[in-house]
Structures are given as C-alpha cells and as structure tokens.
Amino acid sequence: MQAYIIEFVNLLLRWLHVIAAIAWIGESIYFVMLDNGLRTPKAAEDREKGIFGEMWAVHGGGFYHNQKYATAPAKLPNDLHWSFWKAYTTWLSGFALFVILYMVNPGFYLVNPDSNWAWAANLTGWQANLLALGFLLGGWVVYNELCKRISPNMERDGLLSIAVAVMMVVVAYLSTQMFTGRAAFLLTGAVMATAMSANVFFWIIPGQRRMVKAMKAGEAPNPLDGKRGKQRSVHNTYFTLPVVLLMVSNHYSFIYAHELSWVVMVLFIFAGALIRQFFVLMHAGKIQPAYPAVGVGLILLAFWVAAPSPRAAVEGAGDAPTQAQVSGLIEQHCTQCHARNPAHAGFSAPPAGYAFDSWEDILGHKASIQQVVASRYMPLGNITNMSDEERDIIAAWEE
C-alpha cells in the first residue's frame, strides 16, 4: 500500500507539474511572440499617448488589439495581470517530484557507481542528496553572478550569452560525472529551470513591482528594472526548449546511459536554443532558416554520437547464449522489479511497464534490455552485482 500511495502522489504531482509548465511556458512564448510582433501604431493619438507598438490578432472567432507602452500610461489600472504563480508552481511541483523519485532512494537514482571520480562513485545516499541540492543552488549562484558581473547594465548581453552557454557545457559534464545518467540529465535541466524560476522570483517580479509602485506615485520608474527583467526573460526563452527535452529524457536511456552522454546533452541544449531563436526572429518578421538547419544538424550529430556499436557490444561474448542462460540472468538481475507483481518493496507495478514474467515478455523487450544492460544503466546502481561477463552474454543474445 505504501508503494501505491507514493506512485499515486507521483501521478498527481506530475500532472500538476505538467499543467503548470504548459501554462507558464505557453504564456512566456506568447509574450515573446507579442513583443516581437509589435508594429508602430498607425493612429497618431496612440503614438501621442506613448504607445510603442501594437499587434492585431484573430483567434477563436474574435479579434484582439494588443498595445505596448514605451513609458508609463497616463493611468495605470489596478487589475494588472501578473505572471508568476505558474513559474513558482512549476518549480515547486518539479522539486517535490525530484524528492519523492530520486532523493527518497538516492543510492539507486543518484549515486553513479561507474563515475570516473572515485569520491563520486563512493558517495552515500545522504551525501548524494546534499550534492544534488548543492548542484542546483550552485548552478543558480554561478548563473546569477555571471549576469551581474558581465552585463549588469545590459550592455554586454552578447558576451553574457556566450558565458552562459559555456556554463551549461560545464554543468552537463559535471552532472554526468557526479550522478547517474538519468539524474544528470534531470539535474542539468533543473539547473536551467531553477534559474528560470529564480529569475522570475528575484528579478522580474520585484522589478515590475518597483516600476508599478513608482508609476502609481507619479514617479518615473527606474529603466534598469525594465531592462533587467527583459534580459532575464530572454534567457528564460532560450532555456525553455532544452529544459523540456531534458525533463522527458528519463524515458530514453540510450541518450543518458551513453559514455558521452554529456556531449549528447550539450548538443540537444544548443539545438533547442537555436530552434527557439528561429521562432523568436520569425515573430519579428525575420525568417532565418539557418538556425533550425543548424539545430537539426546538432540533433543528427547527437543521433550519431549516441548510436550503439553492434561490434563493440558483442566483443568477447563467445558463442551465442541459450534461452536458458538469458532467462536465468534476467530472473536473477531484473525480475525482482520488472514483474507484474514486483518483489521489490518500492514498486506496486513494474517500472515503465516492463514485466519479464515470461520468455515472450522478454523477447518483446529484447532491444531495450540489451541497450540498458550494455550501457550499464541497469540494474540500477548494479545492486544485483551483474558482472561484465553476464553483460556480454546479454549483448551476444541473438534469439
């Protein structure tokens, strides 16, 4: 019953997380589109009122006229629409999911026993949890300091973008050395997601509140608040697509269990940012197909890097293994969890729906079994002590 309750809470939290993320990202994309789609107002009275740009749109059978003021309007209404609870809910629900899925059992899901760094491979569960929390906090601190030191007045945002890109390469590499591949992809995405939510909490919303307060008091708002909010919003825009990819990557072990998983991760991050850039420019009336072309090129490069090597997989395996050998190894190392009625106390149903109760079940998942065993992703944390010789047998399985 305890495992069932945890899984049900997991389901509800994941549902909340997805709903909040859709609402937040959708609204963010809409406002970027709106901001870049503005045109100089045609009416002289609008220009005299300080309207910077306008956009006409049609949706759902209705017509909409959006206007943006370059300076404070003559009268600011009390019922302003604020965009922040979606961001906070997305992060809080995501963090709660991370706690119940990873931090409750860090020995399985966080500790990387195959790390090239001995200290990381030998972490205890509580040490891995502290390291994960420090990784998230450290990511935000470094990113925030880069913004404050390189472009505090938003005059060197180009250089800042390069610095943030380099930072993400470093984060991707460090995460794959410190944590299991699945957790590394998630935590790298969480570093960006934390920066996005923290941008809203610490910079965008406080700056907007100061601007509104000044305007209502009849004072000129500090232009740096608006510029800084814009800077952080732009960063959030380019983080969006990579974060979504990294958050769904836990379903695809072929990318996070690869020995060069950090390279694959970096390629996907840059591909997502380039594809997002295409749409940002498109809303401004500039069609630049080179951006998505390069993005697709990076995705194809990731496909090539992550592709398995059949020759390497069967090296040293000897004769083709028998059905009895394969089924025996799977029963020994896999079916404690991957069964219709798992013996493992942490599961009330087989993880990812993979149940190996019969030979037909095993054959139906042959490719997936070979991939996760060869990459050493499974068994999790190698808790069953599967040997290299046993992995070779699974790799050489042909039936």
Image (cartoon, rainbow, N blue to C red):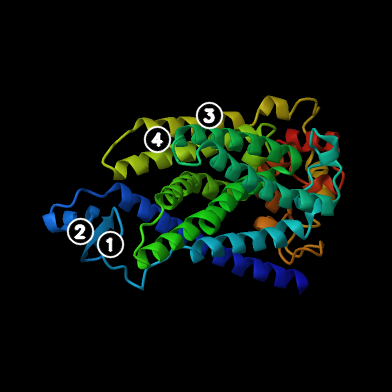
The residue pinned by badge 2 equals 49
- Residue at image coords 36%, 61%: 219
The residue pinned by badge 1 equals 73
Label 2 element class = loop
Label 3 element class = helix
Q: How far apart are marks 4 and 3 (CA)?
A: 14 Å
Image coordinates for residue 347, horizontal then vertical, percent = 75, 63
The residue pinned by badge 3 equals 301
Between label 3 and label 1, give the one nearer the viewer.
1
Between label 4 and label 1, give the one nearer the viewer.
1
Q: Which amino acid does label 1 sit on?
A: Pro
Q: Which of marks 3 and 1 is nearer the N terminus?
A: 1
Q: Is residue 248 visible?
A: no
Label 3: how many residues lie within 10 Å, few (<14), some (14-19) or many (20+)? some
The disc label shown at residue 292, or none: 4
In which quadrant will I find the N terminus? bottom right
Q: How far apart are marks 1 and 2 (CA)?
A: 7 Å
Task: Work out whether residue 166 or residue 122 is closer to the camera in this orientation and state it.
Answer: 166
Image coordinates for residue 126, horizontal then vertical, percent = 83, 54
